[in-house]
Amino acid sequence: MLALINRLLDWFRSLFWKEEMELTLVGLQYSGKTTFVNVIASGQFSEDMIPTVGFNMRKVTKGNVTIKIWDIGGQPRFRSMWERYCRGVNAIVYMVDAADREKIEASRNELHNLLDKPQLQGIPELICHSRPRDLLLLCFLQRERQHR
């Protein structure tokens, strides 16, 4: 009986409450943006990804929430587009491949360049590290080398 009442309340709420959000995923190439979108959208993980050329857009609906996700290419030629796709969104998600030490400095610089744009002030941003397990392994190996 309680389950039936909860379903009825959920249905009733769904008539009045729907949320639409828009967010933009940016970061250097091969930082895991498209993989992140695919996992959110379908729950599927694939290591065989083709680099994003320009941008991709996907709408993901979970319950009463629909999220429009802009996945912007991270190659140098597309970075000038980042600001355009970040204007007016609910949040900016900046992806970093934390295990790729050679790109950390470039990634940090691009993030600062993006966040310095006046039109993006006030938009919440989230910095997301992909491959954290690799980062932990890297830190462990580095510590082991220092102790030898």
Image: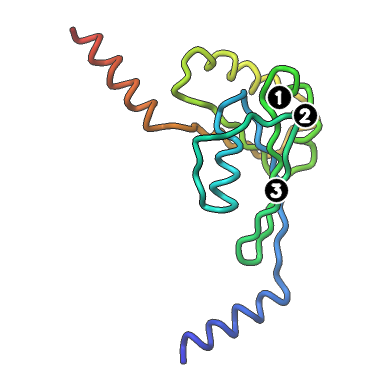
Ranked by sequence position, the earlier of labels 1 and 2 is: 2
| Residue at x-position 64% and y-position 80% | 11
Res 27 → quadrant: top right
Is 17 drawn above or below residue 45 in the view shown? below
Marks 2 and 1: in contact by CB < 8 Å?
Answer: yes
**Closer mark to the observer between disc 1 and disc 3:** 3
- Residue 99: give its label: none
Residue in the image at 72% along x and 39% along y: 56
Q: Position of residue 111 (x, y in %)?
A: 64, 23
Disc nearer the start of the sequence (2/3): 3
Residue at mark 1 to residue at mark 3: CA–CA distance: 22 Å
- Which residue matches tag 1? 114
Quadrant of image for the C terminus: top left
Give the class, few, some or many, for how many residues have Cα within 10 Å of label 2's Cα (few <14, many ≥20).
Answer: some
Within-10-Å neighbours for mark 3: few <14, some 14–19, many 20+: few
| Secondary element at image label 1 | helix
Tell me whether circle 1 and circle 3 mark residues in contact (CB < 8 Å). Answer: no
Residue mark closest to the camera, 2 vs 3: 3
Q: Identify which residue, 103 or 56, lies in the foreground.
A: 56
| Residue hosting label 2 | 83
Question: Are the residues flagged by discs 2 and 3 in contact, CB closer than 8 Å?
Answer: no
Q: Quadrant of residue 120?
A: top right
Residue 146, percent from left and from top: 25, 9
Quarter of image, res 141: top left
Question: Relative to the observer, which residue lies in front, 122 or 53?
Answer: 53
Q: Which residue is mark 3?
A: 58
Type of amino acid under label 1? Leu
Q: Position of residue 95 (x, y in %)?
A: 57, 31
Q: Amino acid at mark 2?
A: Glu
Residue at 44 percent across and 23 percent down: it is 99
